[in-house]
Image (cartoon, grey):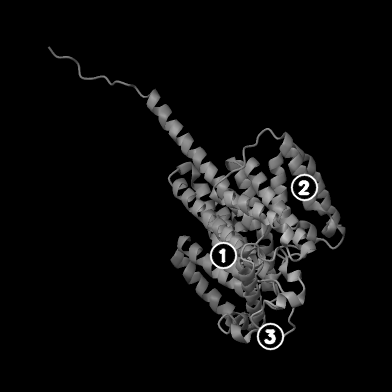
Amino acid sequence: MRDIVVIGFILGLIPFILARAWIGVIAWTWIGLMNPHQLGWGFAGSFPVAMLVGAATLVALVFEQQKKAPAMNVAMGVLLVTAVFYTVKMPLAWSNDMSWEVWNKTMKIFLMTFVMGMVIFGEYRIKWLLWTVVFSMGFYGLKGGIFSIVTGGNHHVQGPAPSFISGNTEIGLAMNMVLPLILVAARHAQRQWIRVLTYSTFWFTIIAIVFTYSRGALLGLAVAMLFILPGMKRKLLLTLALVPVLIIGIVLTPEKLFDRAETIRTYEQDESAMQRIQAWGVAKNIAIAHPLTGGGFGLQDVNDDLWLSYADFLGNWKNYARAAHSIYFQVLGEHGFVGIALFLTLLFATLVSLTRSRRVLLNIPEARWLADYTWAVRIGIFAYIVSGAFLSLAYFDLLYLYVGLSAIIAREVIARQAAAANRASTARIRSPIWSKGPANSY
């Protein structure tokens, strides 16, 4: 029954997508992040919903009259160069079948990032996109937080499988990226019940992140909260309220959470951590041997002997080809030093663009809402930079959505600056060019 409802709803969106391409981008974002079709137990999980929505969006784009040129900034320019680079070197990939599969999925994400910049503009559409992100990941934050409390934190919080966020570390990273966005959405919610629900989702998401039992997620949460807490109102009241909660939490929290956190300091004694270090060494050595191209997409699926020949050491576990477990070593091993340079430039350019945009938006009273969301997206990328050091999510669609958003926001800044300048110019024209002076005296 659940499968029928989900697929029926998605199919019902197709006519609306064909009429308005921007609705297709919203639906694509919802499906890509939340993966609603994976919440069923039957045919919905294998139904090609993303392909269907993506195809309908591209068809609608051809006939769409209200569209613009793709939003571009330095980050989007780097993304375009990255797409070309990935494609040109595909014939040199080691894991041919898997490489083309990952390339196909990645290029679809890149393509829809450019399409997003063509049809998402203006306050109404931008807010729809942002709230779609909040709803998609907030669902798992709310659900995971409640689940952790009900079960006493004795189980890992995980995402739907198969998807980008199926594992505990993966969904922990995704929730860290969206956590500040949930907070800003709550602050700007117009209706009381939505505000209360969204604030509740924010706090439950923090609980859910903790009980992913992911070391990377815990570090990412720490970084996100370093940015979030200084900006929260009533800090003293919040601190006093949290003290008893923390005391109760420490008493009731399962011991395995503390054991998991302790392994951050004693990683040499943790087999999982050492396997990751082994994989990082493989990626590093492949890049040194093939600095321009790396080994191509899907290195974890190459021949075990070939993969192990690049290892710095072998462990006391079953040694075989593994994922890099780090966005940085994933890109380094798969695309060499050129690839990692492009990836780091992409992250840096996105952060710079968001920082500059927010600085301008803060001086435009009617755009303060966008300045707040820009702040949240920037923190989300910082969380990705930290949490991503511990898992292979270099091609995560949420990252590229944020990259695209940085260009959309930059375009909005230019439009609002032009509108402000136009208003000022109009005001000068309408003002009298002379003023009545004092009466002549004789």
- Type of the residue with mark 3: Gly
Residue occupying image coordinates x 52% and y 58%: 348
What is the C-alpha distance between the residues marked 3 and 2? 45 Å
- Type of the residue with mark 1: Ile
Q: Earlier in the sequence, mark 3 or mark 1?
A: 3
Could you classify mark 1 by the number of other residues whose Cα lies within 10 Å: few (under 14), some (14-19), or many (20 or more)? some
Give the x, y percent position of residue 376.
Answer: 54, 56
Q: Using the image, determine if residue 16 lies above or below residue 291.
A: above
Q: Which mark is residue 53?
A: 2
Residue occupying image coordinates x 76% and y 57%: 36
SS for callout 3: loop
Q: Using the image, determine if residue 409 lies above or below residue 435.
A: below
Q: Which residue is mark 1?
A: 385
Task: Answer with the quarter of the image where residue 254 lies.
Answer: bottom right
Is residue 373 toward the left or the right of residue 160 in the image? left
Closer to the observer: label 3 or label 2? 3
Residue occupying image coordinates x 40% and y 28%: 427
SS for callout 2: helix
What is the C-alpha distance between the residues marked 2 and 1? 30 Å
Give the x, y percent position of residue 362.
Answer: 45, 48
Is residue 356 toward the left or the right of residue 269 in the image? left
